[in-house]
Image: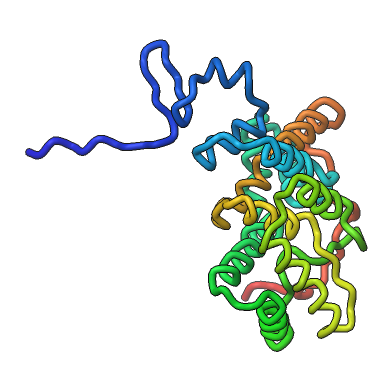
């Protein structure tokens, strides 16, 4: 019988009295790194420079909460209202994060990174992307918002990214797409925070497949706050809907 092959990981090394993450001693990290820097390290494999640290902090703060109505917050409150523990409630909220809620970072980053890899002129590529979207009657992920006409988080993230020299080809492309959307649709459709994060993490060299993860890391403290508030301020199993639903299904009928 062949010996089972050992698992291999390049993330952490654990031994008796020793914990190293990407080669760095955890005790030293606790003293010298911020949480955002540690997140950058564990995902990227190397420590961030000062500019990357600032942007990572901004990204993790930007999506920490957006009220009680988004699916993840509502799911968290609903699960804990059913008498479940906090960990189950937060898990419920995270499971509510999907392509329509939190997924635009991943979707947008994928489009941007694929376009940059193809190496075409940015203006031409932006026209091509928007033309295809218009023909397919689809929306560009990372654009528009149900509440904000201009997303203040996106504006600030682009400002900081430019200030610290992070802005690169992916940011240039998404800004070109914004202009092209206005020209081809006749509507001003602003970049939202998901689109801004998608462009900035792409400029920092993160794989688009990590996109949804950035949202999860940022939003989890907010979900904890919602779970705790629901637990300590509200009655269990309360009505979490705004109104009683109006039934519009099949009328009364009998079997047989």
In the picture, measured across the screen, residue 17 lies left or right of residue 65, that is left
Q: Nearer the viewer, residue 3 or 51?
A: 51
- In the image, what residue occupies the spot 42% across and 15% down? 18
Of all residues, the one furthest to the left in this rendering is 1
Measuring from the top left, give residue 28's x and y in whole percent. 56, 17
In the picture, measured across the screen, residue 62 lies left or right of residue 96, that is right
Measuring from the top left, give residue 180's x and y in whole percent. 79, 79
Residue 189 versus residue 137 in the image, above or below = above
Q: Nearer the viewer, residue 21 or 172?
A: 172
In the picture, measured across the screen, residue 116 lies left or right of residue 135, that is left
Measuring from the top left, give residue 155's x and y in whole percent. 86, 54
Residue 165 versus residue 91 in the image, above or below = below
Q: Quadrant of residue 3?
A: top left
- In the image, what residue occupies the spot 78% across and 32% down? 225
- In the image, what residue occupies the spot 70% across and 50% down? 166
Of all residues, the one furthest to the bottom in this rendering is 135
Mark count: 0
Q: Quadrant of residue 235?
A: top right
Measuring from the top left, give residue 38's x and y in whole percent. 60, 31
Q: Nearer the viewer, residue 74 or 34?
A: 34
Residue 79 appears in the picture as rendered: no
Q: Nearer the viewer, residue 138 or 108?
A: 108
- In the image, what residue occupies the spot 52% across and 37% down? 46
């Amino acid at each position: 019988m062949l010996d089972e092959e050992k698992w291999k990981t390049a993330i952490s090394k654990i031994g008796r009295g020793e914990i190293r993450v990407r080669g760095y001693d955890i005790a030293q990290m606790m003293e010298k790194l911020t949480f955002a820097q540690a997140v950058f390290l564990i995902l990227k494999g190397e420590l961030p420079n000062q500019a990357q640290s600032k942007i990572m902090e901004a990204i993790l703060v930007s999506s920490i909460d957006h009220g009680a109505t988004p699916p993840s917050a509502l799911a968290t409150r609903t699960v804990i209202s059913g008498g479940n523990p906090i960990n189950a409630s937060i898990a419920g909220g995270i499971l509510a994060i999907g392509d329509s809620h939190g997924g635009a970072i991943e979707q947008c980053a994928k489009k941007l990174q694929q376009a940059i890899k193809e190496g075409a002129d940015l203006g031409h590529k932006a026209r091509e992307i928007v033309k295809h979207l218009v023909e397919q009657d689809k929306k560009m992920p990372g654009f528009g918002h149900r509440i904000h006409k201009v997303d203040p988080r996106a504006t600030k993230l682009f400002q900081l990214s430019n200030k610290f020299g992070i802005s690169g080809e992916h940011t240039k492309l998404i800004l070109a797409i914004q202009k092209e959307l206005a020209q081809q649709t006749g509507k001003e459709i602003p970049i939202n925070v998901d689109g801004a994060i998608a462009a900035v993490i792409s400029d920092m060299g993160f794989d688009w497949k990590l996109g949804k993860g950035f949202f999860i890391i940022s939003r989890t403290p907010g979900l904890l706050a919602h779970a705790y508030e629901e637990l300590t301020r509200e009655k269990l199993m309360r009505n979490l809907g705004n109104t009683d639903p109006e039934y519009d299904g099949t009328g009364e009928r009998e079997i047989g």
